Image (tube, rainbow, N blue to C red):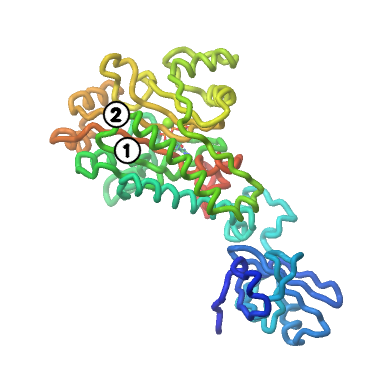
Amino acid sequence: MEFRRTHYTSQVTQEMDGQTVKLAGWVHEIRDLGGIMFLILRDREGMAQLTMFKKTIDPQVLETAKSLSRESVILVEGSVKLEAKAPGGYELVPARIDLLNPAQSPLPMDTTGKVNAELDTRLDNRFMDVRRPRVNAVFQIRHHTLSAVRNFLEQEGFLEINTPKVVATATEGGTALFPITYFDTEAFLNQSPQLFKQIMMSGGMDRVFEIGPIFRAEEHDTTRHLNEATSIDIEASFLDHEDVMQLLENLIVHVYESVAKNCANSLKTIGKELDIPKAPFKRLTYDEAIELNNEHSKELLEWGDDLSTNAEKVIGKVMGEHYFIKDWPTEIKPYYTQPYEDNPELTKAFDMMHPRMELSSGAQRIHDHDLLRQRIQDQGLNPDGFDFYLKAFKYGIPPHSGWGLGAERLVMTMLDIDNIRDVVLFPRDRKRVSP
Ligand code: ATP
Ligand code: MG
């Protein structure tokens, strides 16, 4: 059976009036108005209206059209007729409709946007949920976001790497890990590519990035945490924390600009106009952040406290746009962050924040072997478990810096989406491991 299309619905243009095209996709809606029948065909890129006057249409085409159930897959051959009121500015007069695969009814959920489904129903039927134009648009934007990230980093001289997700030890203390059975020993799903990307600084790769999954076995029940998330990670030699903060803000601006440019249709579908942030982002010191919180919130913080969710919200509201918090107490940042040489109580670490939440954490890293080993010990971890990592610091590793940026948080804050589960195809949370 022939099932090749000549065009996506969005590729049919004004100049094609009268031409024959083949469109392929799903039966989105059928409207039978007596003398005239409309069929809306939907593909990944949009919709097209098939118009059939019962008096003039080939009876066999009409019969096929009448027999179609919603969401069936069809191939339509027809001639283009400009029609300002139809989606895309044209209608198709079908000469032939082939049913490629029928859909059973009733459908597990509605795809037209007329009936709202619960999140659980949508996720249980994700294949059908993604057919909805709004959801499709979100994932097109997610694609373009990651594509813009890759373009930007490649232009800045970064090499894309892939590091293992099955590991023998934790990256950082504190975060819970998912244990797995690895032949006859125990292993874990990696919570971050941190150690491996740093090792590659010793490998002389200079600037690397990875876009990959991170696994965190924390029993979160929030709209901004997943147990499997996607992290955009970079590590760069011969750069300090200020340098990689600059890279990060420029990347964010580039992503917004690229999405605004390449995703006009998708943005329209979800009804979102992008506000492109301006670099440089404001920089608060940790001290200033604490002060701001204490000025505006009833929940007072003391020096040395981590920022609570509430504090992130309060400070975010005051700032009103992306910003950095830098110069954190060494105590509350991971062992691998570089303390200031003249004030080791503070570390060259930063968080990059959207008014709603944290998007990224980064730092200049310790490159001195002995200091790093000491810091691991100070944080109550056993340095012996880190031999494979520490070894890379004994034979010449340059000063280096980097950050990790949550891909889902980047997309959800850019698009004003409330729940992180709406920007992942198959979210993994405490209650969901399937599909
Ligand atoms: P939070 O304090 O918001 O839970 P974190 O400080 O534990 O985040 P990091 O270890 O700093 O997270 O990871 C770097 C980035 O990866 C975060 O800023 C965030 O964007 C993303 N990220 C981390 N954990 C998760 C998660 N469980 N779900 C979604 N994104 C995450
Ligand atoms: Mg963090």
Q: Amino acid at mark 2?
A: Tyr
Residue at 61%, 66% in the rendered image: 10
Per the image, the residue denoted by label 1 is: 194
| Callout 2–callout 1 Cβ contact below 8 Å | yes
Q: Quadrant of residue 86?
A: bottom right
Sequence-earlier tag: 2 or 1: 1
Residue at 26%, 26% in the rendered image: 376
Q: Quadrant of residue 18?
A: bottom right
Q: Which mark is residue 336?
A: 2
Tell which residue pokes out farthest to the bottom in this image. 59
Left or right placement of residue 18 versus residue 195 in this view? right
Q: CA distance from mark 2 to mark 1?
A: 9 Å
**Residue in front for this viewpoint, 364 or 299:** 364
Q: Residue 7: image x %, image y %?
A: 57, 72
Q: Amino acid at mark 1?
A: Gln
Q: Residue 8: image x %, image y %?
A: 58, 69
Tell which residue pokes out farthest to the right in this image. 34
Left or right placement of residue 54 versus residue 334 in this view? right
| Count of number-bearing discs | 2
Where on the image, by quarter, is ligand 1?
Answer: top left
